[in-house]
Amino acid sequence: MLLRRPDSLGIYIHFPYCLQKCHYCDFYSVPLDGEAPIRAFLTGIEQEWQARFPDFECFSAVDSVFFGGGTSSLLPAWALRQMLDLFQERFSFSPDCEITLEGNPENLTEQYLEELAQIGITRINAGIQTFSERHLRTMNRFFDAARYADMLDILCRSPFRSRGVDLIYGFPGQTFDEFMTDLHRVATVGLEHLSVYSLTEEAGTGYATRVRDGSMPSPDEALQERVFETLPSVMSDYGYTLYEISNYAKPGFECRHNLRYWLYEPYMGLGPGAHGFDGRFRYGNVRNIDRWSAQPAAATKNEHEVEIDLPLNLFRLTIPFRPSWMKRILKENGSRRADDVQAFFEEEASLGHGFFVDDDLFQWNEVGRLQLDGIIERWVLNQKAK
């Protein structure tokens, strides 16, 4: 899993439109009104693609494409096909290229999924979050019990190589048994991937505003801690392996875009609010559809701090890695402190702070997963002292 593909590239497309804004969401999104914004978005994507290509033309092939948002399932199949054709004008897609589309249950109809399969989408991720109408309505999210049940059945019968679902836990008033019922419902139907996130108060969201003014309570920390401690063993019983702090997959079905991001591999980010990494610089696009449309490639570039960023990424991943691999990546990215980074990991392992070493592999233990915040804090302080 940790073998890099130095000549390959990923592409991430941020479609910024939603039908309504969920209170907990801090991703950039605006309301969609008709088809005209979609056509304008496609024009902007083509302009940004042409402008960014020179920074990525050294790569020989694309092995992952990820349509996120927003609600990317609001994109008609013809629009998705238009973007895929655009990308393939300059790059070949690897034979096993993973093409993901995120969607909401209300949009993922049987006909739409059939159209997606026909244009080459290989992976679907559905944002269910919970089957509780009470919790979803509290968060300003669409819910129809029959539609959710029907969508899950359709998804399980669909021909995609990988099918996944997102869940959230920690809703105000949610009980442990309520969440476990949600989890059992999606973990027993044959899906290849499950993302399980804790509810958070992200600055600027409707939920954070309501917590601040007292109209809604903060997430239930006791519930979140109990779920977090319980998940790995429960998910293992269901046949899923934890490969990132909130993501579980059947063997061989880890999300390639997720791994590409956390393993410091290049990907082109397109669309308002998208981020990308060309192998030297990370960049972020403006979070405003009008400003992005006027200058699609006017991003903010930041030279990455590899000594800090790469270990932080590895902390979030729960897959084994070799120190020699980490040192090589650090040196390839211009780090002059590769030995210091390895020494930190070795010290953490020797003290029992979350890692153990087996056959020259650094691996997590359960203590490490539960003490992740402390490990990250020690790492940041370690680097500030350099």
Image (cartoon, rainbow, N blue to C red):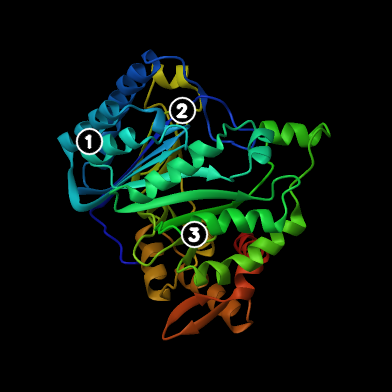
Mark 3: amino acid: Ala
Q: Residues within 10 Å of mark 1 (few under 14, many from 20)?
A: some
Q: Residues within 10 Å of mark 2 (few under 14, many from 20)?
A: many
**Which type of secondary structure does the marked residue at label 1 adopt?**
helix
- The structure residue drawn at horizontal position 74% and vertical position 44%, both measured from the top left corner, is 172
Please state if 50 lies on the left or on the right of 20 as rendered.
left
In the picture of the structure, the residue carrying the numbered disc 1 is: 87
In the picture of the structure, the residue carrying the numbered disc 3 is: 187
Which residue lies most toward the right here?
A: 214
Real-space CA distance between mark 1 and mark 2, rounded to the nearest whole angstrom: 19 Å
Residue 58 position within the rendered picture, expressed as x and y whole percent measured from the top left: 21, 46
Which residue lies most toward the bottom here?
A: 359
Please state if 191 lies on the left or on the right of 119 as rendered.
right
Please name whichever residue, 80 or 356, is drawn nearer the observer in this view of the structure: 80
Q: Earlier in the sequence, mark 1 or mark 2?
A: 2
Instruction: Work out whether residue 290 can be spotted.
Output: yes
Please state if 144 lies on the left or on the right of 207 as rendered.
left
Mark 2: amino acid: Pro
- The answer to which quarter of the image holds residue 131 is top right
Q: How many marks?
A: 3
Please state if 197 lies on the left or on the right of 105 as rendered.
right
Q: Earlier in the sequence, mark 3 or mark 1?
A: 1
In the picture of the structure, the residue carrying the numbered disc 2 is: 16
Q: Quadrant of the C terminus?
A: bottom right
Please name whichever residue, 320 or 132, is drawn nearer the observer in this view of the structure: 132
Real-space CA distance between mark 3 and mark 1, rounded to the nearest whole angstrom: 34 Å
Placement of 108 over or under 178, stated as above or below:
above
Residue 226 position within the rendered picture, expressed as x and y whole percent measured from the top left: 70, 63
- The structure residue drawn at horizontal position 39% and vertical position 20%, both measured from the top left corner, is 295
Residue 71 position within the rendered picture, expressed as x and y whole percent measured from the top left: 46, 32
